[in-house]
Image (cartoon, helix red, strand yellow):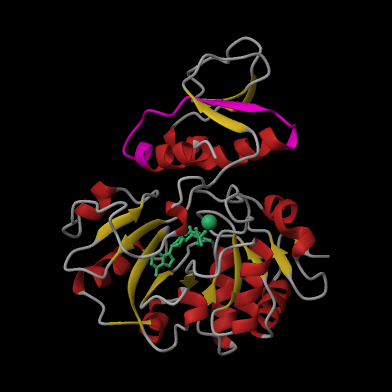
Amino acid sequence: MTLIKWPSAENILLAAKNLKAGALIGLPTETVYGLAADAENENAVKRIYAVKGRPKNHPLIVHIGSIAFLEKWVKDIPEYALILAKTFWPGPMTLILKKTEMARDFVTGGQESIGIRIPSNTVAIDVLSKFHELGGKGLAAPSANKFGAVSPTSSNDVEEELGEALNKQVDLILDGGPSIIGIESTIINCLGDEPHILRYGSILESELKSVVNLEKSLKNEHKVRFSGNNNSHYSPKASVVVNEKPLTGDGFIALNSIPTPTGCIRLAQPRNIYEYARELYSAFRMADRINLKRILVVPPIGNELEVAINERIAKAAYKK
Ligand code: TXA
Ligand code: MG
């Protein structure tokens, strides 16, 4: 069986051993599920691209289990980046830093920088610890979806999305419960004198500003290649419309304080903005599972997390 629910210590060890031998593992993280491979293994990393249908020059994030492994992958770490790492790791934050020789072109897409993070999901941490014990240095893991599709937030989503493409003998999907954040990590470019946000996530600008000086966001001006930056991304098959007039048969996503319009099918009724982030992608997936043509989305109001959520909604709604 490829999908392992409630992984035991033996399952975790098996996953770590298989990773070491070049397998791919669907790995739970607190943000979204990843598709992990040994970041030092060129063939394994190439399989990630093949399974996802992802263009080869799009860089991957390396996941490590402890800060002790940071300097294997990156060098010339600015003081502010260390402060960010110590404050927000393990957690939903990726830092872009200058790479070492260890980070090869097949992981970085040929760039001189690399994205790195320590996830906080306990299954992810357990797999990483075992993998490090076996001599592994880090796991390259993009979100476990086909290129351009919605990121998976449960192990069943990963199976549905990539199950067919995985190798039944060695690849595994580990369950680690639903992703508690539900949207991808906040990505911070740490290559300049001051950090700036490349992708908004659940670590908020105000939280970052409480520990470092943040450069005005240079969104869309950065020179690094950045696949989440494509206009059409995170898209379900159904077309996504925002704040439009409801039509009969529309899927409907809104905070639960907003009633379902007559004739619409409720896909999620989050009680607050955090639940909204957590449920958005699974609601998109539900729409596709029941073959809806259109999803009507009412963006949430709450706090700064709106920025990250609206970014995902806008990309999902982008007309191809
Ligand atoms: O929450 C997350 O970040 C999830 C979980 C699995 O960790 N991962 C994730 O990976 O979202 P992915 O590959 O789907 O998105 C990572 C984004 C891509 O848009 C990629 O271009 C960007 O990070 N990225 C990675 N390395 C980079 C680098 N060196 N410079 C600029 N952008 C980079
Ligand atoms: Mg992705």
Q: Which residue lies furthest to the top in this view?
A: 262
Q: Is residue 6 left or right of residue 315?
A: right
Residue 233 lies in the magenta-colored region: no
Q: Nearer the viewer, residue 169 or 249?
A: 249
Read off the magenta span.
289-307
Q: Residue at x 60, y 56 (%)?
A: 147
Q: Where is residue 140 in the image (x, y as percent from the top left)?
A: 53, 73
Q: In this view, does 51 lie above or below 40?
A: above
Q: In this view, does 58 lie to the left or right of 174?
A: left
Q: Position of residue 59 (x, y in %)?
A: 47, 69
The reply to whether residue 64 is in sight is no
Q: In which quarter of the image is residue 248?
A: top right
Q: Residue at x 55, y 70 (%)?
A: 56
Q: Which of 303 and 184 is in front in this view?
A: 184
Q: Residue furthest front?
A: 320
Q: Is residue 83 above or below residue 66?
A: above
